[in-house]
Amino acid sequence: NYFNHHQKPICDELYRILDKDFIFISTEYMSEERVKLGYSQSELPTYVLSICDDSQKKYVAIDMINAADVVIIGSAPEELVSQRVHDKKLIFRYTERPFKKKASVLRKMYHAIRFRIRDYGNKNVFILCASSYAYDDFYSIGLYQNRMFRWGYFPLEIENDVDDLISRKDPNLLVWCGRFIDWKHPDDAIMIAHRLKNKGYTFHLNMIGTGIMEDELHQLVKKYGLTDYVHFLGAMPPEKVRKEMEKAGIYLFTSDRQEGWGAVLNESMNSCCAVVANQDIGSVPFLINDGDNGYTYPSGNLDKLSEKVELLLDSPKEQKRIGRHAYHTIHETWNASIAAERIVHLSQNLLEERNNLNLYTVGPCSIISK
């Protein structure tokens, strides 16, 4: 839909590999909410073609799409690829889970019919799952079996001296980052702070972001006497968010199943944080191996969330172990450079009509099957 800092690293890598044979088509303007959060669209790369409110550019884009060897389509108008679908040319549908909210039988039937009509009989349409739960959602409506691959978002990977970074962290500092909205559950972070205070822990919690729940969160902090423990840092650009993550020993990720992916997980793991994350978040089962490179907890279970946070506060050594493993997960597998190389390799195999889709066993472009 629109170009942003979360898409830039993978696009830069594809442009590096493919040179002028790569283009990003932007179909929407960035929302004002995202701009306020520190997103920026200034100085767009030369490979970005914006067709917002420009019918002439739209037809140019459609011609380019129809002529391309490979098209990856995310949240964009279906008319852009309708001819390509008809011609049965290679398409990757880049998607989070279709049912972020629990779907009724009727809604599932509607989606099944819509997807089947759109991609009926087309074996050249594949799914890049930007959520570990996308497979289950599509499988539940009988679609795309054996044509779904692990994928995700690939924000900027920052290379660091791991030992040096970990040595500079504050093991008593927790950080939370995101929009202050209901399904991201920033109030859960405040409630954990309340529990930690009551148990006598020494800690600080930095809350990064803005949103409609901000007044409510400030009221909670006052209600529970947390003004010396919880600090609201406001919205800040991505590079400053990363600096805050690099200071913290623990990162709290409290969103529910409506969090399609959650790029802050990549970023906090790359920053050597010991992450405690809701297991219903789309990126979590792909990126976190519970107890090895992070901790997970059942959605809505504050007892389990608090238990994992307390374990980490009680053991700075465990924080360091988890943070180190988290960094290596991003550095060795889940980053833009590896993802770009793999999607090009996979595309070449599909264009040459090779039948082996099991090119990778883990990470980006590994096939998902029951």
Image (spheres, rainbow, N blue to C red):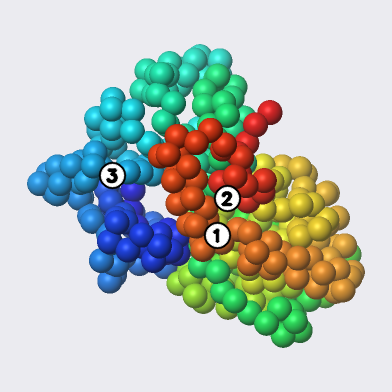
Residue at 67%, 79% (x, y): give it: 247
In x, y percent, where is residue 329?
68, 61
Q: Secondary structure at mark 3?
A: loop
Do the residues bearing badges 1 and 2 touch, measured as CB atoms within 8 Å? yes
Whether 3 is drawn above or below 298: the answer is below
User: Dot 3, how many residues are within 10 Å of its Cα: few (below 14), some (14-19), or many (20+)?
Assistant: some
Which residue type carries mark 3? Ala
Separation (CA) of disc 1 from disc 3: 22 Å
Q: Earlier in the sequence, mark 3 or mark 2?
A: 3
Q: State the image quarter where residue 171 is shown.
A: bottom right
Q: Residue at x 38, y 37 (%)?
A: 91
Instruction: Provide residue 181's location: percent of width, then percent of height.
Output: 53, 50
Residue tagged 2 = 364
What is the three-letter code of the residue carrying label 2?
Pro
State whether residue 37 appears in this view. no
The residue carrying mark 3 is 68
Q: For the residues marked 3 and 2, what is the alpha-carbon distance in whole angstroms? A: 22 Å
Q: Amino acid at mark 1?
A: Ile
Quadrant that contains the C terminus = top right
